[in-house]
Image (spheres, grey):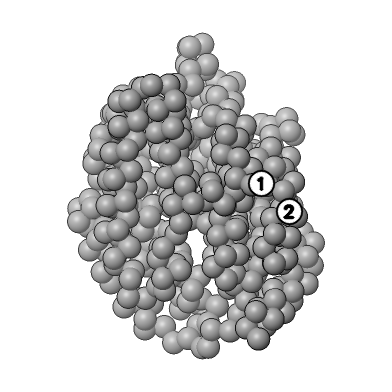
Amino acid sequence: MSKQDLIDIHSGIERDLGVEKNIYVPYMSDHGHALVGAFRNQGLTATMLPKPDSDCLDYGRRYSEGGECLPFVVTTGQLIKLIEETPDFDPEKSAFFMPTSSGPCRFGQYHTAQKLILSHLDQPVEIISLEAYNSYSAENLGFDFRNLAWQGIVAVDFLQKTLWRTRPYEKETGSADAAYEESLEELKQKMAEKGTSGLIEALEGIGKKFNSIETGPRDRPLIGIVGEIYVRANELCNCNLVSLIEDLGGEVRVGPMAEWLYYTNRKKKQDGFRDRKFLKFLKGWAKDLVQHYGENKVKDKFSDYLDKKDLSDPSVGELADNSHPYIPEDYRGEPVLEIGKAIDYAKKGADGVITVTPFSCMPGSMIIAVSNLVKKDHQNIPWLNLTFDAQQSTNIRTRLEPFIFQARKYREKRSS
């Protein structure tokens, strides 16, 4: 690996992958299955890594200095565990998928630091890095890949909402999880085999699976989870927060992954307009149209068993407007979206809001700093800020118990 490779942080795929390389997608959330399906549809070999465990944390900490944020530790640990524990691992025929970003977040340095670690280990594993503010475009993969991956990610968003809407009320424990896992695997396989037509085909049967699950009355407080994208989506990092809230008597919604991708496209358009790069602006505008079209195709397949609130997420423009009194959009990055989404939850009848951030996260600190102001301006909705460092502590449950009690009382007060 040359010195230029180590400092190269430009967007796009850095070298021609070729079908002989296996692209390993680190587990952030189940949306990774959609990426694997899209890669395979292009004739590439792709593997979704297992959910991270304590071994990944040990590996990641071994190659960290202590000041890195939790998502870096976990993704690095997944990479090192892959290398150390995969029999006959061939670095020359392997690639690691690690997107990147710019702005006030260390996410933009993950892939660079991981290249340095790989160099230190003498492991020439290629890292594929797509840039957020280029809307994660990759010319090498073409329109079909981007469109299929986008629709797959949106499908997983809606599939997760279906799971979260059903699981707290199921009469037979485990039935919703079984329907979800079966649907997720079918989604990935159909995407790989038939592309977008396969994706839509897979979605046709999801409603039947979940409608066959017997459920009880819907009487739980609804909790909206926002915050740093990786931690809110990753069960290891957030100590299985969704399941814990459900065990304590709540129902959960987590901010969708699609909103971040819409946001990166919005910044691309704004940057193009500001810099008078009108071709860039027009590309962003056209991409928005294509994304909305693809989202509506997917959404239509969930319209019979999700309610209006779950089907209609606000635009990123609305989220930015919500956030503006507290964090102006010029700040750039997750805080704008997360405060905007928290306000959206409050406006749409959520009974509580939880923000999740990794320890020492810079954008997360901004969210926490304004959270009390947001809470006061929105009827003092119960609000809890949680910071995670992957220590599996009972402290989380201890803090959640009174919060869920407050959310239930808040729900009763609004109902009366």
Q: In the depicted view, which residue is nearer to us: 210 or 334?
A: 334
Residue at mark 2 to residue at mark 1: CA–CA distance: 8 Å
Q: Secondary structure at mark 2?
A: helix
Q: From the viewer's perspective, is 281 left or right of 160?
A: left
Q: Can the viewer see residue 100 in this picture?
A: yes
- Answer with the quarter of the image where residue 112 lies: top right
- Type of the residue with mark 2: Leu
Snapshot quadrant of residue 24: top left
| Residue 367 picture location, percent across and down | 68, 47
Foreground residue, 302 or 289? 289
- Please report the residue visible at 50 percent of the width from the left and 70 percent of the height from the top: 164
- Asked whether, in this view, residue 359 is left or right of residue 191, the answer is right
**Does residue 17 show up?**
no
Residue 155 rendering spot, x and y as whole percentages: 36, 58
Q: Which residue is mark 2?
A: 373
As drawn, 139 above or below 374: above
- The answer to whether residue 303 is above or below residue 369 is below
Between residues 170 and 255, which one lies in front from this camera angle?
255
- Identify the residue shown where x is 62% and y is 76%: 221
| Label 2 with label 1: CB-CB less than 8 Å | yes
**Image location (x, y in percent) of residue 165:** 49, 74
> How many residues crowd around disc 2 within 10 Å: few (fewer than 14), some, or many (20 or more)?
few
Give the residue at mark 1: 326
Q: Position of residue 38 (x, y in %)?
A: 30, 46
Q: Return the residue nearer the eye: 84 or 314.
A: 314
Amino acid marked by disc 1: Tyr
> Dot 1 lies on which element?
loop
Tell me which numbered mark, 2 or 1, is placed earlier along the sequence. 1
What's the residue at 66%, 67% (across, down)?
352
Q: Quadrant of the C terminus?
A: bottom right
